[in-house]
Image (cartoon, rainbow, N blue to C red):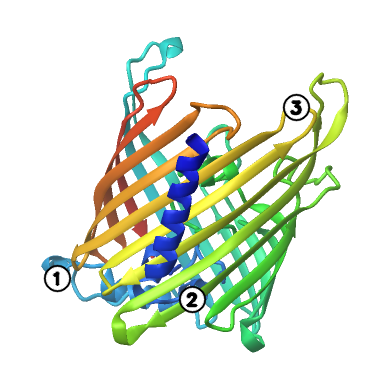
Amino acid sequence: MKNLYRSAVLITLFIFGTSLQSKVFSYPKFAALSGNMCIDCHVNPDGGGMRNGGGNFYAKNNLNMDLFKKLAGKTEFSPKITKDITLGSDVRVAQVDNERADTAKSYSNYNAFLAMQGSIYFNAQINKILNIYASSGIIVPGYETEYEVFGMLSNLPANLFFKAGRFKPEYGIRIVEHRAYQRKYLLNAPDNANTGFELGINPGWFALNAGLYNPPQSSEFSGFDPHKMLIANTNFNFAFEKYFFNINFGGSFMNNPFNTYDSTFTGVITALKQSFGANARFGFLKTIALLSEVDFEQNTSDFPMRRSFYNFNELDIIILKGLELRFQYEIYDKNRDVPDDDITRVSTGFAAYPFYGFETEIMVRFVNETPKIKNNEFQWNFHFYF
């Protein structure tokens, strides 16, 4: 019954998403609303990170409220240092209040201010086809510094591009929330940048890329594990401007062999982590955006095989310019062969963009898991960017 229910939900969501339903400004919902592709608004063709001229243009014209125009003033800001050197930044701070108790540390719930992101982006356009990109992130105790650095050849025929360096592989919908189950447990976000190379093509109505990387489980700098992780991603984009309707759908695949200890912890064996997923994004009337992603994961070693399932859905509705309602529904099944180990999370709230460079979001999350525990959460985010 459990598998039948999940299959029905999966098929319904995928058909609904692809029959109605698009990536920009590191928020895929904006691409769904505008009909753009990642490459239209970001220096990195995969999306996320520094915005290009198209991304800044979209933000300045759409992410603001008329109410705050006079307060914000008419200062024209440019992220360009010179004609060919550009800076950018994302700063995110969150106030998180979680019901979950920690008896070991003797507190009844978790309540803290968190510096979630502090990134500075640098891009130098050496010539028409060559870019050098670097970003530096805050150092969070116990976590590797989040940074990306790569060289890229782009602006080639059919938007062919090649990247080599350390960056986040392209898999699924690149939503900004690294705590979404598929990004946290499947992709190890936010620390999921890996060293390798990627080749891609994006002629306009579809995108296809594939890359080889050091396994995330290896020593990232020295790369002692000789295996390589393969990630491939594709999506198709159709914008029907006459009908104010945009649709984008695609799929992803990951093959990640890596060395690990066996179940007796006495020898080293090769384990294998594989996953494949499908996603769909649509925009309607430049007002409603729907995102949906499903992923199937399989881990094999001499431990019993574990097969996991992920489902993420988001609905965004613009109430008025600069203000939107947001709803999310997530499922994480840790092991599809074990009953009653699902986690579901329903989130609701709103996001406001008073003026260019600032966003604030309030979300309430209701979590249901077995065994039943109090794990609901209130989250207030502040995002500063340019």
Q: Amino acid at mark 1?
A: Asp
Comparing 129 with 215, the one in front is 215
Q: CA–CA distance between discs 2 and 1?
A: 31 Å
Query: Image height check: is 57 above or below 142?
Result: below
Q: Which residue is mark 2?
A: 237
Give the residue drawn at x 42%, y 55%: 12
Q: Amino acid at mark 2?
A: Asn
- Residue at screen point 54% across, 75% down: 85
Q: Nearer the viewer, residue 102 or 287?
A: 287
Q: Earlier in the sequence, mark 2 or mark 1?
A: 1
Q: Which quadrant of the figure contains the C terminus? A: bottom left
Q: Residue 320: image x %, image y %? A: 16, 66
Residue 373 x %, y %: 38, 20
Q: Nearer the viewer, mark 1 or mark 3?
A: 3
Q: Residue at x 34, y 53 (%)?
A: 383
Badge 3 crowding class, 10 Å Cα cut-off, few under 14, some 14 to 19, many 20 or more, is: few
The amino acid sitting under disc 3 is Phe
SS class, disc 2: strand
Real-space CA distance between mark 1 and mark 3, rounded to the nearest whole angstrom: 58 Å
Q: Circle 3 sits on which residue?
A: 303
- Which residue lies at the image location 58% right of the left edge and 62% below the top edge? 251
For mark 3, give the secondary structure. loop
In this rendering, position of residue 354 left or right of residue 77: left
Give the image quarter of residue 367. top left
Q: Is residue 378 left or right of residue 48?
A: left
Q: Position of residue 39 (x, y in %)?
A: 52, 75
Please name the residue that numbered disc 1 is placed on.
66
Is residue 128 left or right of 18 when viewed as pictured? right
Disc 1 residue crowd, few under 14, some 14–19, many 20+, Cα 10 Å? few
Q: Say above or below: 6 vs 157.
A: above
